[in-house]
Image (spheres, helix red, strand yellow):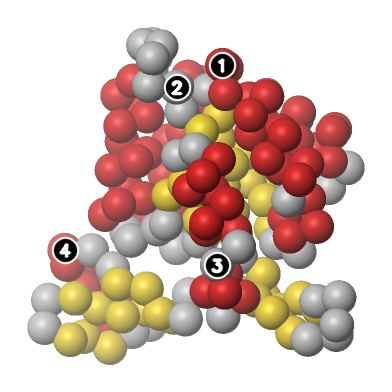
Amino acid sequence: MTRRTHPDNARALAATSGRQTGRVTTEKVRTTQSSGPDGSRAPRRRIALVAHDHKKEDLLEWARYNRGVLSRHDLFATGSTGRMLADELDIGVTKFQSGPLGGDQQIGSRIAEGDIDLLVFFWDPMVPQPHDSDVKALVRIAVLWNIPIACNRASADFVISSPLLSK
């Protein structure tokens, strides 16, 4: 799978890992393989899971329903969301700081480094966030690096069930 990268980074990436095409560079996305239930090999995606306080229960319910799919991928999450998911689902989750304490920025950094393939971010548009600038920066960096973003259950269902997830 290839992913388009930000034009300002085209020269640096062309020298190290991709081929330059005009102002945009294509880069191989690093993934590992996992065996599906039928023995087929599918790439392990690196999925970041983030939820604001009023949306944590929605994310947990969605993750419970999709536990089988999520268990075949590498999961990353911010603070309490990561602890909650790891405890409830009994699957490995790499946990960063809480969002307001820098966790959103840590995930954004991983996206910029090419270490996150998908962002599931259940944010609450009705509640002002004290770290709103970090939230906007995370969404901005995901859009800039062409990372799919699911912001609610409907979009998360579409992304997690897409055949592109396993290609």
| Label number found at residue 162 | 3
Q: What's the residue type where badge 2 is placed?
A: Asp
For the residue carrying disc 4, how many other residues have a C-alpha within 10 Å: few (<14), some (14-19), or many (20+)? few
| Label number found at residue 54 | 1
Secondary structure, mark 4, is: helix
Label 2, label 3: how many angstroms apart (C-alpha)? 24 Å
Question: Is residue 147 at least partly visible in the picture?
Answer: yes
For the residue carrying disc 1, how many other residues have a C-alpha within 10 Å: few (<14), some (14-19), or many (20+)? few
Q: What's the residue type where badge 3 is placed?
A: Ser
Percent position (x, y) of residue 105? 43, 35
Q: What's the residue type where badge 1 is placed?
A: His
Q: Residue sitting at 52 percent across and 74 percent down?
A: 164
Q: Residue sitting at 53 percent across and 22 percent down?
A: 52
| Label number found at residue 124 | 2
Sooner in the amino-acid sequence: mark 3 or mark 4: 4
Secondary structure, mark 1, is: helix
Percent position (x, y) of residue 114? 45, 63
| Label number found at residue 8 | 4
Sooner in the amino-acid sequence: mark 1 or mark 3: 1
